[in-house]
Image (spheres, grey):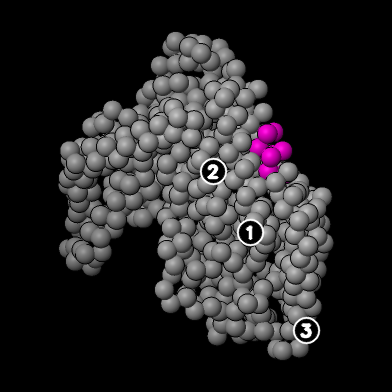
């Protein structure tokens, strides 16, 4: 398959694409509220009895904030994503039933009830569209939310809340059993492959964040925030490619290290694993060793590190945990580096580099074939009409932002200033985009919401032949 993606027909989206979409949705409920989670984490780290500066009065905010503020923010955001402001109100109304009717922080429940509330009011609004008598719009709009919100609140209190609390208790007990038996590092067998398949947000935002917040309320920290976000394994892998990789991979890895380790954009190392699938063993080994060290030192963070950079890790490390956290990241880096380096040294194949180089040459030869890269869609048959290019990724704030910024600067160097280049979550990319750029493993998901748009797939956000070809085509307009 060519590196340059034409319009690809995906008749039946795969399960992976659908799970990626779920993860993306969860992420976009959490991401706008990360600041509130961090504020709560700082409050906890400073003022609880075991904090840096214990303060009984200020510590009294900790419980209500995690019980009411954070779940309501999540539910409101989830409802807004489905049905705007009316959905946000419905989501918050439904969430208060969950909160009052349960004994645990209802993060997972909020991420369910919020979108559900939005969906209910959206369906209702559609059913009465153009049927409201003139002058009665306000009373119908207000009472519809009031009545439906009341019913949802009662339903969540008596039924949805208890079900979610039971499910949460089961998952919590299972993972605590892993901790008690010392098998918690085995989670890396799931975490690391899931991450490179862009499924990490389903696990992180859907499971580890809620569990972590619950444990933090009790203990002032949680190891769950570290089990999937440790930047050490990715750093070790990229260091190994920097020393023992070949040509393109070796050249681009040092730049990826900066963005991954300090910027917290883990998607940067995914293509390297996908190029050499056996290196996933290095990631798993690094992840397991990091969790083992965190566990041995009883280390944890006070909130979810988003983005997962070393700066986030240090900023959210509570008093007395710095040694364990730093060692966990360091050991994960060393183990991942050693295992990946061995794999790269034993692999004598050069196919990847030869294919990478030849794909660039093929891209250049395609210029004489009528600018094929930009002619694939009937809606965009002329390169002179390209005015909007959208880079899209899982959450719209990591790798797509990097790709958009880099490509925009390259356009500016070519004195091409009439093309809008922005980054989005896949589902939020504008329908009037002339071209959408995504990682190849997200193509099926992109096709779910952009069936007729020209999509270009890439493997590397820093240096990809598809982007080089696109740049050349745009320059020749």
Residue linked to disc 1: 277
Q: Quadrant of the C terminus?
A: bottom right
For residue 365, which numbered disc appears in the image?
3
The label nearer to you, 3 versus 2, is 2
Residue 335 in magenta stretch: yes
Task: Give residue 361's position: percent from left, percent from top.
Answer: 79, 78
The Cα atoms of the two marked residues, 3 and 2, are separated by 43 Å
Q: Nearer the viewer, residue 321 or 279?
A: 279
Toward which corner of the image does residue 464 lie, by quadrant?
A: bottom right
The label nearer to you, 1 versus 3, is 1
The kind of secondary structure element at disc 2 is helix
- Residue pictured at 19% horizontal, 41% vertical: 159
Extreme residue toward the front, this view: 346
Q: Is residue 350 visible?
A: yes
- Residue pictured at 61% horizontal, 36% vertical: 289
Magenta part of the chain? 330-337
Give the dominant element type of the magenta stretch: helix, strand or loop: helix
Residue linked to disc 2: 188
Q: Is residue 32 visible?
A: no
Task: Give residue 380's position: percent from left, percent from top.
Answer: 59, 81
Say few, some or many: other residues with alpha carbon within 10 Å of mark 3 (under 14 / 14 to 19 / 20 or more): few
The kind of secondary structure element at disc 1 is helix
Q: Nearer the viewer, residue 329 or 103?
A: 329
């Amino acid at each position: 398959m060519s590196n340059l993606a034409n319009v690809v027909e995906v008749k039946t989206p795969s399960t992976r694409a659908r799970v990626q979409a779920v993860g993306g949705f969860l992420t976009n409920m959490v991401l706008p509220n990360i600041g509130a989670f961090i504020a709560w984490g700082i409050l906890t780290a400073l003022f609880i009895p075991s904090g840096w500066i214990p303060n009984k009065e200020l510590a009294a905010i900790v419980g209500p904030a995690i019980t009411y503020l954070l779940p309501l923010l999540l539910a409101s955001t989830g409802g807004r994503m489905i049905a705007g402001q009316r959905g946000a109100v419905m989501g918050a109304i439904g969430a208060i039933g969950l909160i009052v009717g349960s004994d645990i922080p209802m993060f997972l429940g909020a991420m369910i009830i919020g979108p559900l509330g939005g969906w209910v009011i959206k369906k209702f609004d559609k059913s009465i569209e153009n049927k409201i008598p003139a002058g009665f719009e306000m009373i119908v709009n207000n009472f519809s939310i009031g009545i439906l919100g009341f019913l949802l609140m009662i339903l969540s209190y008596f039924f949805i809340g208890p079900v979610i609390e039971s499910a949460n208790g089961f998952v919590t007990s299972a993972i605590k059993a892993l901790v008690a038996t010392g098998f918690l590092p085995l989670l890396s067998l799931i975490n690391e492959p899931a991450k490179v398949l862009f499924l990490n947000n389903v696990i992180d935002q859907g499971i580890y964040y809620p569990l972590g917040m619950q444990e933090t309320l009790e203990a002032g920290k949680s190891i769950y925030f570290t089990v999937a976000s440790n930047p050490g394994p990715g750093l070790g892998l990229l260091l190994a490619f920097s020393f023992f990789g070949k040509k393109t991979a070796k050249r681009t890895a040092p730049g990826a290290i900066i963005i991954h380790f300090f910027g917290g954009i883990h998607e940067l190392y995914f293509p390297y694993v996908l190029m050499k699938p056996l290196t996933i063993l290095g990631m798993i080994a690094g992840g397991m060793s990091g969790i083992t060290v965190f566990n041995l030192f009883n280390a944890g963070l006070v909130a979810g590190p988003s983005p997962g950079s070393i700066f986030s890790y240090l900023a959210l490390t509570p008093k007395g945990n710095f040694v364990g956290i730093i060692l966990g990241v360091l050991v994960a880096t060393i183990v991942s580096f050693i295992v990946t380096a061995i794999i790269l040294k034993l692999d004598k194949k050069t196919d990847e580099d030869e294919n990478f180089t030849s794909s660039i040459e093929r891209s250049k030869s395609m210029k004489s074939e009528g600018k094929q890269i930009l002619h694939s869609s009937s809606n965009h048959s002329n390169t002179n009409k390209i005015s909007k290019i959208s880079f899209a990724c899982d959450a719209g704030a990591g790798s797509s932002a990097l790709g958009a910024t880099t490509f925009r600067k390259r356009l500016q160097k070519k004195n091409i200033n009439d093309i809008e280049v922005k980054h989005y979550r896949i589902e939020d990319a504008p329908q009037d985009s002339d071209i959408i750029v995504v990682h190849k493993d997200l193509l099926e998901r992109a096709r779910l919401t952009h069936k007729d748009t020209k999509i270009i797939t890439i493997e590397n956000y820093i240096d990809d032949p598809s982007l080089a070809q696109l740049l050349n085509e745009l320059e020749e307009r």
